[in-house]
Image (tube, helix red, strand yellow):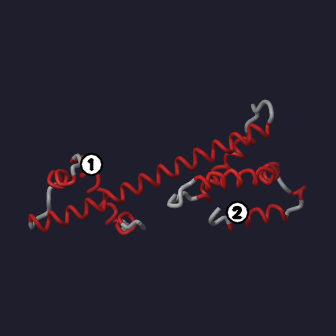
Amino acid sequence: MDSHKSIQEFLRELKSRPPNNRSDNERLFLRYNEFILSSIADYKRLASQDCRIDWDDVYQDAAVALLEIAKDPDIRGNFSTYVQREIINSIRRSVETESQFKDFVSRLRLELRLYQKCVQELHAKLRRTPTTTEIAKQLGLPSLHIAHLKRLCQAARDYEMMDYLTEWPN
């Protein structure tokens, strides 16, 4: 993991406690921690270099899944097999969710940059503020979509977040 310093600190603190002072959840966590880390490492190896997944979030999702499993009184059969399968499922879901969200944000930022550039170009050409319909026609997008981008730009300006929304490392 890229920045698992806090995770390592947490584990050191947990391991430093006398075994009889650990809760059942802490013992369970220590038992399956290496499995969680190695499973995440497998996904990380498969991920592309430009993947912007926050692996600490994936780790936290897997740890939460482990604790949720521990609360389930209806587990039948081999507990270890069940836990491992559920941890892997949790990691897979987390990676999918993270990557879908990052893709959405990346597309949105691109659309915002295109929208702003189009508004500037049309403003210079028309010598007035372009209408939503004119922007939509220029970009080949529905007017409703342009209206949403316009509101998002305004909200970003209001909250002084425009730089965050429109600048993205290449």
Residue behind mark 1: 145
State the image coordinates of residue 75 (x, y, percent, origin top left).
Answer: 76, 33
User: Which quarter shows the N terminus?
Assistant: bottom right
- SS assignment at label 2: helix
- SS assignment at label 1: helix
Q: Which mark is residue 136?
A: none
From mark 1 to mark 2, how far is it between C-alphas?
A: 42 Å
Indicate the amino acid at tag 2: Ile
Q: Residue at x 41, y 56 (%)?
A: 105
81 left or right of 49?
Answer: right
Residue 120 vertical position relative to residue 22 in the rendered view, above or below: below
Indicate the amino acid at tag 1: His
Q: Residue at x 53, y 47 (%)?
A: 96
Residue 109 vertical position relative to residue 92 in the rendered view, above or below: below
State the image coordinates of residue 16 (x, y, percent, origin top left).
Answer: 84, 65
20 left or right of 88?
Answer: right
Residue behind mark 2: 7
42 left or right of 81?
Answer: left
Q: Residue 16 or 170: which is nearer the viewer? A: 170
11 left or right of 47?
Answer: right
User: Which quarter shows the C terminus?
Assistant: bottom left
Q: Residue at x 14, y 65 (%)?
A: 123
Question: Which quadrant holds residue 124?
Answer: bottom left
Q: Residues within 10 Å of mark 2 (few under 14, many from 20)?
A: some
State the image coordinates of residue 117 (x, y, percent, origin top left).
Answer: 24, 64
Residue 128 vertical position relative to residue 58 in the rendered view, above or below: below
Q: Residues within 10 Å of mark 1 (few under 14, many from 20)?
A: few
